[in-house]
């Protein structure tokens, strides 16, 4: 699985909340986001295949938010 840039996490937090994040804090946020992204992707792929599609679409992601969080 790809890795979310810790620098990107730090910039995002600084931009939206105007606080700094330690390297360890950025690492932990990135790990959590990567785990959640894996769950979302898995749900979306299953949803696409259920509809006989080889591509994940926006609806598959939105369905995860609405139905899939269990």
Image (cartoon, helix red, strand yellow):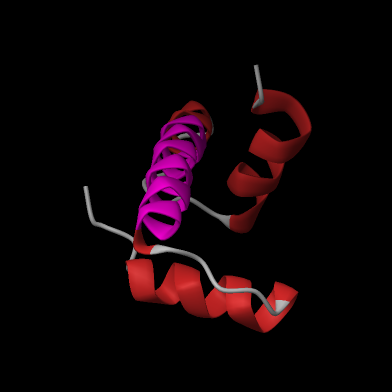
* Prevalent SS, magenta region: helix
Horizontal side, residue 35 vs residue 58: left or right: left
Query: In the rendering, at what x and y percent does residue 62 appear?
Result: 70, 46
x and y percentages locating residue 70 in the rendered image: 65, 16
- Decide which of 64, 26 is in the foreground and name it: 26
- Is 20 placed left or right of 3 in the picture? right
Residue at point 47%, 50% (across, down): 29
Left or right position of 43 against 18: left
Q: Nearer the viewer, residue 64 or 52?
A: 64
Q: How many marks?
A: 0
Is residue 1 positioned above or below 64 on the image? below
Please give the range of residues in magenta: 24-44
Magenta span includes 46: no
How far across and down, in percent of the image, does residue 61 sit?
61, 47
Please report the residue visible at 45 percent of the width from the left and 54 percent of the height from the top: 25
**Which residue is painted at 47% across and 68% down in the image?**
9
Q: Position of residue 33 (x, y in %)?
A: 47, 47
Residue nearer the viewer, 45 or 35: 35
Residue furthest out toward the right: 66
Q: Residue furthest left?
A: 1
- What residue is drawn where x is 65% and y is 25%? 68
């Amino acid at each position: 699985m790809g890795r979310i840039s810790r620098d990107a996490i730090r910039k995002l937090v600084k931009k939206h909340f105007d606080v700094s994040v330690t390297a360890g804090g950025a690492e932990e946020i990135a790990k959590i986001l990567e785990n959640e992204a894996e769950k979302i992707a898995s749900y979306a792929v299953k949803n696409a295949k259920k509809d006989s599609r080889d591509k994940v679409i926006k609806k598959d992601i939105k369905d995860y938010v609405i139905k899939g969080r269990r």
